[in-house]
Image: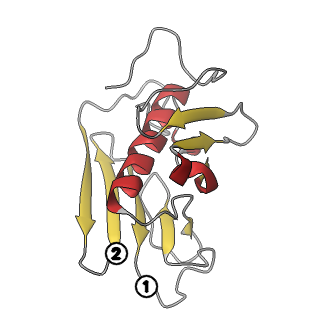
Amino acid sequence: MYSPVSADAVADEARIDVRWTTRDDYTFHYTDSTEVDLRWGRHPHGGDYVRATGTEHYHPPPDASSDPDAVDDSCVAVSPAVLVTRAVLKLWRVAYHHGSLAVLNTGDDAVAGAGHITSRPSGGEQSRVDVAQGSPSSGSSGTRSGSTAP
């Protein structure tokens, strides 16, 4: 994944840490060697995040800030663990193919339960990813030539 700081910076290492509680709260935290951090979460926050209206929220890159004005509603609003995991991984795949972290929280979750995520990057073209298969569907123009997802 290209770093948002420099188009030439590529992460040598990256990981997604997942924490899930018995109350179905979760955190999916992405971190990489270019010091990019972001995370999706679902847990009570007492209204601290002024732009996140529900328990599902997104801490954007580059630092996964917990500043109350930086946290947004999450586009992932499904609850079964398997669907949340698929949605996060598919959103990551869409971002990889777009070569941009900006599309990570732009999925349309209304279709996630139906088996796909539709990513709508601002000013960009729409990409649809099959949650079960992990592949861009026909008509998707969000892939970069010569690149494949890890």
Task: Measuring from the top left, give residue 11's x and y in whole percent.
Answer: 31, 32
Give whichever of 70, 21 is nearer the camera: 21
Question: Quadrant of the rendered structure where residue 134 is?
Answer: top left
Residue drawn at x 59%, y 34% is: 128
Task: Measuring from the top left, give residue 127's x and y in whole percent.
Answer: 62, 32
* Residue 105 in view (yes/no): no
Specify the amino acid type for callout 1. Pro
* Residue 121 in view (yes/no): yes
Which sits earlier in the primary sequence, circle 2 or circle 1?
Answer: 2
Specify the amino acid type for callout 2. Asp
The reply, left or right, for residue 41 in relation to residue 105 is left
> Image quadrant for the C terminus?
top left
Q: What residue is shown with label 2?
A: 25
The image's colour scheme reads: secondary structure
> Image quadrant for the N terminus?
top left
Asked if marks 2 and 1 touch (Cβ < 8 Å), the reply is yes
Q: What residue is shown with label 1?
A: 44
Give whichever of 22, 29 is nearer the camera: 22
Q: CA distance from mark 2 to mark 1?
A: 8 Å
The reply, left or right, for residue 52 in relation to residue 62 is right
Q: How many marks?
A: 2
Task: Measuring from the top left, give residue 139's x and y in whole percent.
Answer: 67, 21
Residue drawn at x 52%, y 10% is: 145
